[in-house]
Amino acid sequence: MTPSGDHHGSIGVFDSGIGGLSVANAICGLLPQESMLYVADNAHAPYGARTDAEVIDYSRLVTDFLLAAGSRLIVVACNTATSVAIDALRTEYTEVPFVGLEPAVKPAASGRYVGVMATAVTLRSARYLDLKARYLSNRPVWEDPCVGLVPLIEAHGTGSPVVRSYLEELLAPAGELDTLVLGCTHYPLIVEDIRGVVGEAVNVIDPSGAAARQVQRLLERRGLVEERAAGMARYDFHCTGGPAPLQRTLWQLPELNAGRRWVVPYLALNER
Ligand code: DGL
């Protein structure tokens, strides 16, 4: 695999598709001076329907690509990959700081009846089960692997009647939730559709902002903060499958769209 251009010092961000853009958008808003290199591994999506071993393998491939291109910090902007692969990545790439995304169960701990939307891989992972036991043990929790929702978001994005009717059917049996954790980075992209179904009174938790602040903390702690002027940052977005979902979504995200410094070339990752 060959990275196009020089991305030396960039923040590397990856997901199985467009979901990680919710995190990339938050990073861009908080750290506008930082360049970013994004990979949507949509040739292998959805990760949530894969085995743990496959998700670990794809995560390695993408990490190799980002590091070869010059990224100095990697954001695993995917709850699914974080839940099964981030420990392996941290063990194998000891010099590299990683930021992962986990279902925001801790901030949900004040809820009386909490819902968690996440993929099957995330919901069965030891990381999630530990978090749930620690923060949500003494109350009812509704959770659903949302089978088929990620491909719908990739294909249609926000505001689509197909996504809306999926959500209505999905959330009807949940009953009167007061808190809903978005445990997959694709879901913040349809947060308005979700709010439209559950109602404004429900506390919908999107972890993108917290992840961006964690990136900032790590960069500061390691003395890796970029000094360049904000307008000089460079963003590149690669996909391993078709570019349409990335192109459509980049236009819709305010922080990323503001700079319009992105391109979406095709990326072929060689299996190893
Ligand atoms: N955005 C991913 C996550 O946060 C995706 C899921 C998938 O590919 O199934 O879990």
Image: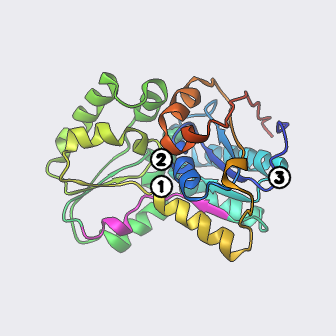
Indicate the position of residue 25 as horizontal and vertical percent values.
Answer: 53, 47
Q: Is mark 2 within 8 Å of ligand 1?
A: yes
Q: CA distance from mark 3 to mark 2?
A: 26 Å
Amino acid marked by disc 2: Thr
The residue located at (67%, 40%) in the rendering is 39
Image check: 259 left or right of 252?
A: right
Q: Which residues are magenta?
A: 98-110
- Image quadrant holding the N terminus, namely top right
How many C-alpha atoms fall within 10 Å of the one at disc 1: few (<14), some, or many (≥20)?
Answer: many
**Residue 8 circle label:** 3
In the displayed structure, would residue 45 be above or below residue 6? above
Res. 12 mark: none
**Which residue in the structure is indicated by mark 1?**
208
Report if the CB atoms under discs 1 and 2 are less than 8 Å apart. yes
Q: Percent position (x, y) of residue 78? A: 54, 49
Q: Amino acid at mark 3?
A: His
